[in-house]
Amino acid sequence: MGSISDEEMPAKKEQIKQKKCRYCISEIKGNGAECTTCSKGACGNCCKSNKFLSLNIHNITAIPQSSFSKNEYEQKVLKDYINYQGITDLKKEILKTIVKEKWRYKGKELKQNDILCEDCFKNVWNELLYEYRKSINDSLPKKVKERSNCWYGKDCKTQAHNQDHAKKYNHVCPNTKT
């Protein structure tokens, strides 16, 4: 992959010129990029500049181990659903179902062609997986969709290391114990 094309560049080129590259500390000039969510930039000259891509372009097909707060049971539920439905392009399915034209992430409106750094993309992708899993809940087997919600929901610390707890309670829900 090469540099980011002009049509993929964020509209804030003037602001980018005053920043330093997060990878090589060079000044960011015209062919650089800035992440839509964290506003960190890359100069476009160092080897890390291709880590800034749009949702459309980032190449991801897997359900990362970090998704669902490392809850392997919720990851398996989604994997089983994808296999059962014969979904071959998960990213395309999620962009079509969840993102559509635009989507809100941490108070910012994101579009499919917004530029994201690799770190923010991982976080956005995990959140998109969560939202997608939430949207298919009614289509899941009875034993999955009728589990009681964990009080701590997606913020539960136990779900990652206690598989019995992860399986017994739904964690694709908000934290109600604040």
Image: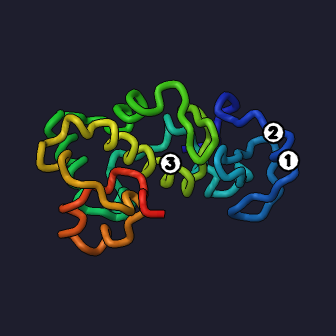
25 in relation to 54, above or below: below
Disc sitting over residue 13 in the figure: 2
The residue indicated by pointer 1 is 17
Of labels 3 and 1, earlier in sequence is 1
The amino acid pointed to by label 1 is Lys
Q: Do the residues labelled 2 and 1 touch (CB within 8 Å)?
A: yes
The residues tagged by marks 2 and 1 sit, at their Cα atoms, a distance apart of 7 Å
Q: Does dot 3 land on a helix, a strand or a loop?
A: helix
Q: Which label's residue is closer to the chain start, 2 or 3?
A: 2
> Secondary structure beneath disc 1?
loop
Three-letter residue code for mark 2: Lys
Judging depth in this view, the residue of 64 and 165 nearest the camera is 165
Q: Where is residue 50 in the image (x, y as percent from the top left)?
A: 59, 49
Looking at this view, name the residue that lies furthest to the front.
177
Q: Marks 3/1: CA distance? A: 26 Å
Q: Quadrant of residue 139?
A: top left
Please give the residue where the numbered disc 3 appears in the rendered image.
124
From the viewer's side, name the closer residue of 52 and 100.
100
Q: Which residue is outermost to the bottom?
A: 161
Instruction: Choose top left, top right, bottom left or bottom right for residue 33.
Output: top right
Spatial distance from mark 2 to mark 3, Cα to Cα?
A: 23 Å
In this image, 66 relative to 82: left or right? right
Q: Is mark 2 on a helix, strand or loop?
A: helix
